[in-house]
Image (spheres, grey):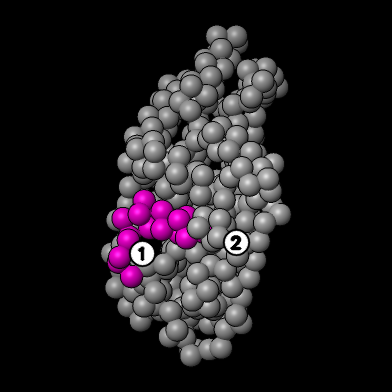
Amino acid sequence: MKKHNFSAGPSILPQEVFDKAAQAVVNFNDSGLSLLEISHRSKDFVAIMDDARALVLELMGLTGKGYQAIFLGGGASLEFARIPYNLLKEGGKAAYLDTGVWAAGAIKEAKLFGETVVVASSKAENYNHIPKNFTVPADADYFHCTSNNTIFGTQMQQFPNVEVPLVCDMSSDIFSRQLDFSKFGIIYAGAQKNMGPAGATLIVIKEELLGKTGRTIPSMLDYKQHIEKESMYNTPPVFAVYTSYLTLQWLKNNGGIEGAEKKNNAKAELLYNEIDRNPLFVGTAKTEDRSKMNVCFLLKDEVHTEQFDKLWKAAGISGLPGHRSAGGYRASIYNAMPIESVQVLVNVMQELERNI
Ligand code: PMP
């Protein structure tokens, strides 16, 4: 039986995407060949890469606005270094908002390249909220933030109006809500949550920002080279790109980002309402900063852990334990998660309440 998969990533994708991707591995487009054995420079694959890149910009409303979308290997973690390599000028300064483990990872890499100002941090409160009222230095080369903090279940509800280029790690909430994407200079996201399998990272770049650092950048780390080569500088992660493309098509056919946002709001409301109503549970993130993608909560009394764990496993739920650095529970309810699965979790929480 298919499980209700609340895993934080790699994570649930639409069933039709799994089916189509599986079919392409066996026999791609009825060609008698697997997707995995054709050249990435074949007409068929080049068309997929081109369409996927165009679809990203279309879904974000960025077509014709000076942006490029590229799919690269290396994971979102490589962008932690690639961003300062491409944007932090020799002798310049970068500004970062520290909202979690991944933000801290990005800060660590930026420090290798130059002065790195942390404008605010919620680390002292175990990253249970998004800091507000910070000032971004006007002379920074860019400001980096993390839109959704996968481990701690917080999400930026607003993005600051900054004078400097806004760079955002959207790994765990990309395509989940409508935003004015033209506010951003660079958006990046590992594929393995809202988009596809692990192995590809999507980077959306305002092209005019590149080429200004004064440093020589190794080709594989140079966004400009990847853009010039239309995301084919080297062999791209073909399976991850194709599967991401299928998910983007699924998103487009199901109401686009607007449609996804409505469903995501309903799912999050259902689950947070139960966490707030049920006397056995408590949410860990400050209410105003709660994530609609990763819902983190605790049992108020750990004595019920064994019973709760038994119940959700028996209900066919998978991937509920929190991240090893946060503990408790984390229900990741990405775009592909149906509200019916969230209802199953809510039912289990209510069953626990009745049983004790
Ligand atoms: N940023 C965020 C917000 C993440 O959630 C993750 C992974 N969970 C990463 C970055 C790191 O991604 P990757 O493993 O693809 O390097």
User: In terms of depth relative to the viewer, which is nearer, 144 or 340?
Assistant: 340
What's drawn in magenta, residue-wise? Answer: 49-66
Q: What residue is shown at x 61% (from left), y 75% (from top)?
A: 220
Figure quadrant of residue 140 = bottom left
234 sits left or right of 89 in the view: right
Label 1 SS: loop
Residue wearing tag 2: 42
Label 2 SS: loop
Ligand 1 within 8 Å, label 1 CB: no
Residue 255 position within the rendered picture, expressed as x and y whole percent measured from the top left:
34, 38
Q: Quadrant where the C terminus lies?
A: top right
Q: Quadrant where the N terminus lies?
A: top right
92 sits left or right of 161 in the view: right
User: In terms of depth relative to the viewer, which is nearer, 150 or 171?
Assistant: 171
Q: Which mark is residue 184?
A: 1
Can I make out residue 55 in this image? yes
Tag 1 or tag 2, which sits nearer the N-term?
Answer: 2
User: In terms of depth relative to the viewer, which is nearer, 19 or 290?
Assistant: 19
Q: Do the residues labelled 2 and 1 touch (CB within 8 Å)?
A: no
Crowd class of label 1 (few under 14; some 14 to 19; many from 20; radius 10 Å): some
Q: Looking at the picture, which amino acid does disc 2 mark?
A: Ser
151 sits left or right of 287 in the view: right
Can I make out residue 147 in this image? no
Q: Looking at the picture, which amino acid does disc 1 mark?
A: Phe
